Image (spheres, rainbow, N blue to C red):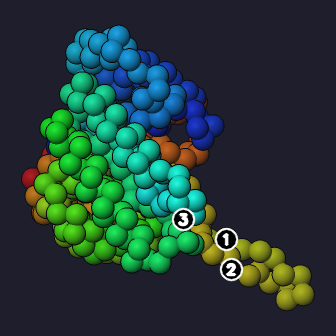
Amino acid sequence: MKLGLFSISYAGLWGQAELGLEDFIRRAAGLGFDTVMLAGKRPHLSPLDIDEARLEKLRRLLDESGIGCDVVAAYTDLSPPPAAEVPYLEWQIGYVAQLARTGAALGAKYIRVFTAYGSPSLAPHQQWALVVRTLREMAERVAELGMTLAVQNHHDVALPTDAMLDLIAEIDHPHCRLGFDAWSVALRGEPLEESARKAAPWTVITTNADYLRYPRYTYDPALVNYRRLEPDWVRAVPFGTGTIDYQAFFRGLRAGGFDGVASYEMCSPIRGGGSLENLDRYAQVYLEWMRKFVLQVS
C-alpha cells in the first residue's frame, strides 16, 4: 500500500495556508509520503494552466524529490442542467480526458471522479443511465492512456455501497473502479468493516480524513428547552482521534484484497486552524497512524 497526500489540503480553499503545486510536491516529499494526489483544478493541476514546458518541470521535480504521482483528482458532477442545448457532459468528458493526458505524463495511474448530485429535472433512473453512459465513455478514453477511473463514493447518485457496486457492474469496463472512502460510509451509518470488505475487490484508491460529530440544537424559549437539529455538525480532527473507526475500515479493505493508494486529505476547516505548521502536523499524524495500525498489521 502506498501512502499519499492530497494537494487540496494545501490549496487554501477552507482558510488553510496555500502552497503552489511545486511547493506542495516538495512539502509532501519532505514529510515522508510515497506519492501525491493532485487536484485537477486551480490553484494546482488545472488543464488551463499546464503546458508541455511545465509538465517537464513537474516530472523533473517528482524525480528529484523521490516521490510519485499516482492519482489526479477530477471534480465532476454528471448532472446536466435543464438547458438541453448545453453540452455539459461533453465538457466534463473532455476535462477528464485532458486530465488523464496530463496525469499519464506525470506517471499517474488513476483519475478520481464523482458521480452526480441529485437533479430535480431528472427521474432517478434517467440520471443513473446518464451517469453510467458518461463514466463508461470516460473509462474508454482514459484506458487509451493506460489509466483507470476511480469513482469516489461522494455525490448523491449511487452513494450507498451496494448501489455503487451495482453502478460499477453496469458500467462494466476494466478501467472503471472504485475510490472507496470511509467518511461517507460512517456518516450514513453503514457498517464500516463489512462495507469495506465488500468494496475492496473493486477499490484502487481510498482518500482518508477523520471527523468528530457534534449534535446541533436550537433553544425554544416557549418550552424552556432545546430542539434537536439535523444533520449533525462534522469537524475535521487529527487522524485517529475522530469518530470514524479506521481500524475496522482498513481491516475490511485488507481482508478484501486492497493494496492500492491511501491518501490523506484536509478538505474542510480543521481544528487548530489552517497554518502550515498545523497542516503539516495533521499530515504527520496520518503517516504515523497508518504506519502503526495498517502497514505493520498483516
Q: Position of residue 47 (x, y in %)?
A: 42, 29
Q: Residue at x 36, y 50 (%)?
A: 113
Q: Residues within 10 Å of mark 3 (few under 14, many from 20)?
A: some
Task: Compare residues 132 and 105 and report the one nearer the observer.
Answer: 132
Q: Which mark is residue 47?
A: none
Point out the tag, 2 or 1, that comes first from the N-terminus: 1
Residue 70 vertical placement versus 257 (above, below) = above
Q: Position of residue 284 (x, y in %)?
A: 38, 35
- Tag 3 near tag 2, CB within 8 Å: no
Image quarter hosting the N terminus: top left
Q: Which mark is residue 213?
A: 3
Residue identified by numbered label 1: 216
Q: Residues within 10 Å of mark 1 (few under 14, many from 20)?
A: few
Q: Amino acid at mark 1?
A: Arg
Q: CA distance from mark 3 to mark 1?
A: 9 Å
Q: Secondary structure at mark 1?
A: strand
Q: Residues within 10 Å of mark 2 (few under 14, many from 20)?
A: few
Q: Secondary structure at mark 3?
A: strand
Task: Compare residues 176 and 247 and report the one nearer the observer.
Answer: 176
- Number of marks in picture: 3
Point out the tag, 3 or 2, that comes first from the N-terminus: 3
- Tag 2 near tag 1, CB within 8 Å: yes
- Residue at the far right: name it: 222
